[in-house]
Amino acid sequence: MSARLVVMGTLLALAALRVSVLEAQDRAQLTEAQNRAGQQMMDRMLARLDPYLIREAEELGLYDREALPVFRGMNPFFLRGDFNGDGGMDVAFWVREPESGLTGVAILHSTLDTLFVYGAGRPGPSPDGEMPNEGRVDTWHVIPAGHVTEHHYGNIPSIGVVEESSFTFERETLEFVFLGKSAFVFYWADGRYWMFWTAD
């Protein structure tokens, strides 16, 4: 009789343990769902602060925020400028490829006809498709039109880039900087972006 009671007691304890494990799993799933919902709500709120061109591109289906979320870990996470020299205000912004976590830069022209994405698991705009340091840099800024660089590295004669010769930027240009080390630019010419080094 006592052995049967022990077995029954053990079975009841196991059942109670299973219930508590299931309850803990349910709580964990609920917490995870709440965290996801909270993150989605935060993303929607932050998206309202994004530049107009980004939101407009999303509405037009040109930019898919879920496939390539805005990456706000770079400060500033977007820059404006007339990168293609057509007189309109373009925007460049950081993005992150969700699966790999790799970051990169997306560029939208004011005409909203194409989304250019470099890095975030995609090739860069250099002749060999290089994207330095997998898209991670220390800082970035816009070089003004008319700026002359005396020291740059790389040969792209078709757009006037000849190593160890001065080069004048004809339009506003994105420069990416590794502090104390090197820098490179994305420069628009002949209907596309080109990458070359401005410091090494």
Image (cartoon, rainbow, N blue to C red):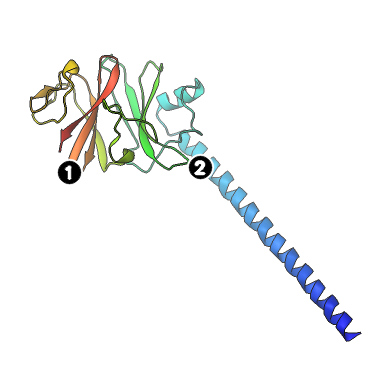
* Residue picked out by circle 2: 42
Amino acid tagged 1: Lys
Quadrant, the C terminus: top left
Figure check: 86 above or below 12: above
Residue at x 81%, y 72% (from the top left corner): 12
* Foreground residue among 129 and 166: 129
Quadrant of residue 49 within the rendered picture: top left
Q: Nearer the viewer, mark 1 or mark 2?
A: 1
Q: Secondary structure at mark 1?
A: loop
Figure check: 198 above or below 31: above
Quadrant of residue 196 within the rendered picture: top left
* Residue 17, numbered circle: none
Q: Is residue 82 visible?
A: no
Asked whether, in this view, residue 69 is left or right of residue 35, the answer is: left
Quadrant, the N terminus: bottom right
Q: In the orientation shown, which residue stands out farthest toward the front?
A: 128
> x, y percentage for residue 18?
74, 65
Residue at x 61%, y 48% (from the top left corner): 33
Q: Residues within 10 Å of mark 1 (few under 14, many from 20)?
A: few
Amino acid tagged 2: Met
* Residue picked out by circle 1: 181
